[in-house]
Amino acid sequence: MNPKQKANISCGIICFLFAAVYFYLTVNLTTSAMLVVTQISAKFVPKLLAGLIAGLSVLLVITTLLEAAPAADSESSIEAELVDNRAFYGTAAAAFLSLLVWYGIGFFSVPFLIAGTMLVNHKKNLLQIVCIALVTTLILYGVFFKIFGVPLPLGLLE
């Protein structure tokens, strides 16, 4: 098994665990609105997202296991496929950390997740990191909370 296949299997397992933790944390998510559509979306959307993440991670592991290992042509091709472990495990750590603080600070964990992921993936422009993290968070807040009415843990804002 080459380094790329090992990384894909590790990523699939970590994403599956993330989906399981996310599913567990959103099981008791309730809504204060009395609309039936809002109540359905409050319970359905997080389960749908967790299911999609879990399904895609299982698919990644299966396709990686079914794919034949490439023949060792040269040392340069193997070196080209080496994984940046710091970025990989840093991204996983940022994702799980954002889940751990989800109910404490609520939706405010999303910009830290985005910024943390960008930092461990060697993004150096601090202004760009802050702008992307904040704009993405505001867009997600506007789409899911304001438009679709999906209740998000607001943490400090409640």
Image (tube, rainbow, N blue to C red):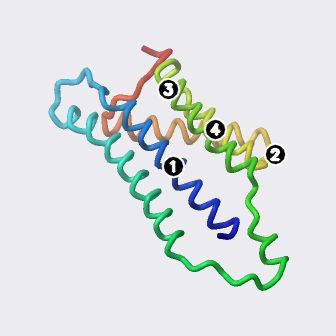
Q: Position of residue 44 (x, y in %)?
A: 26, 41
Residue type beneath disc 1: Cys
Name the residue carrying label 4. Answer: 93
Q: Quote the CA–CA distance across marks 2 and 1.
A: 26 Å
Secondary structure state at the residue bearing disc 4:
helix
Mark 2, mark 3: which one is toward the viewer? Answer: 3
Instruction: Choose the circle earlier in sequence order: 1 or 4.
Output: 1
Instruction: Choose the circle earlier in sequence order: 1 or 3.
Output: 1
Q: Quote the CA–CA distance across marks 2 and 3.
A: 26 Å
Q: Which residue is drawn at 60% across and 34% down?
A: 111
Residue type beneath disc 3: Trp
Q: Where is residue 153 in the image (x, y as percent from the top left)?
A: 42, 24
Instruction: Choose the circle earlier in sequence order: 2 or 1.
Output: 1
Q: Quadrant of the N terminus?
A: bottom right
Q: Quote the CA–CA distance across marks 4 and 2.
A: 19 Å
Name the residue carrying label 3. Answer: 102
Instruction: Choose the circle earlier in sequence order: 3 or 4.
Output: 4
Q: Which residue is drawn at 48% across and 23% down?
A: 106
Q: Where is residue 19 in the image (x, y as percent from the top left)?
A: 44, 44
Mark 2, mark 1: which one is toward the viewer? Answer: 1
Name the residue carrying label 1. Answer: 15
Choose between 144 and 119: the one closer to the eye: 119
Q: How crowded is mark 1: few (under 14 residues within 10 Å), some or many (20 or more)?
A: many
Instruction: Choose the circle earlier in sequence order: 4 or 2.
Output: 4
Q: Residue 124 carries which label?
A: 2
Image quadrant where residue 39 sits = top left
Choose between 51 and 44: the one closer to the eye: 51
Q: Are marks 2 and 1 in contact (CB under 8 Å)?
A: no
